[in-house]
Each structure stands twice: as C-alpha cells, then as structure tokens.
Image (cartoon, helix red, strand yellow):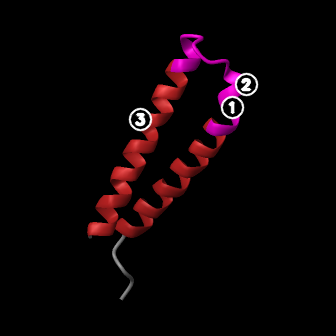
C-alpha cells in the first residue's frame, strides 16, 4: 500500500511540474521549443505513473 501512495504522490508532482512548465510557455518566459522535449518526457512519465497506479489499485485475481 505504501508503494501505491508513493506512486500517487509522484504522479501528482509530475502533473504539477507539467502545469508550471506550461505556465512558463504561456507567459512567454521560456520559448516552447526549449521545453518541448522535456514536456514530452514528462507526459510519458505521467502516463506510466497513471498506469502503475491503476494496475496497483486493482485487486489481485484469485
């Protein structure tokens, strides 16, 4: 259970990082080109963490 909670926290932190990076782009503080690769990696990480949390939350088959 502790591992699931840790993964949920990681997912939340990754989503928050995504928000701040997008805010930097929207306010034109950093050009989107500079963050494009980082945002792509971050989105992949969020997808992986989402999958882990979903699969970890499911009951084990008997």
User: Most prominent secondary structure in the magenta stretch?
Assistant: helix
- Tell me what residue is drawn at x 33 percent, y 51 percent: 9
Check disc 3: other Cα within 10 Å, few if <14, some if 14-19, many if 20+.
few
16 left or right of 40 in image: left
Q: Position of residue 3 (x, y in %)?
A: 33, 68
**Dot 3: what SS?**
helix
Give the CA separation, mark 1 to mark 2.
5 Å
- Tell me what residue is drawn at x 73 percent, y 24 percent: 33
Give the CA separation, mark 3 to mark 2.
20 Å
**Residue 35 highlighted magenta (yes or no):** yes
Q: Against 38, is 48 above or below?
A: below
Check disc 2: other Cα within 10 Å, few if <14, some if 14-19, many if 20+.
few
Q: Are marks 1 and 2 in contact (CB under 8 Å)?
A: yes
In the picture of the structure, the residue carrying the numbered disc 1 is 36
- Tell me what residue is drawn at x 49 percent, y 59 percent: 51
Q: Are marks 3 and 2 in contact (CB under 8 Å)?
A: no
Give the CA separation, mark 1 to mark 3.
16 Å
In the picture of the structure, the residue carrying the numbered disc 2 is 33
Which residues lie in the magenta part? 24-38
Check disc 1: other Cα within 10 Å, few if <14, some if 14-19, many if 20+.
some
Give the number of callouts: 3
Residue 16 badge: 3
5 left or right of 22 in image: left
Q: Against 35, is 58 above or below?
A: below
């Amino acid at each position: 259970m502790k591992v699931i909670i840790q993964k949920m926290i990681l997912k939340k932190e990754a989503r928050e990082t995504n928000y701040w990076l997008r805010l930097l782009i929207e306010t034109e503080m950093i050009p989107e080109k500079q963050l494009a690769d980082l945002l792509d990696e971050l989105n992949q990480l969020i997808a992986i963490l989402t999958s882990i949390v979903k699969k970890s939350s499911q009951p084990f088959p008997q």
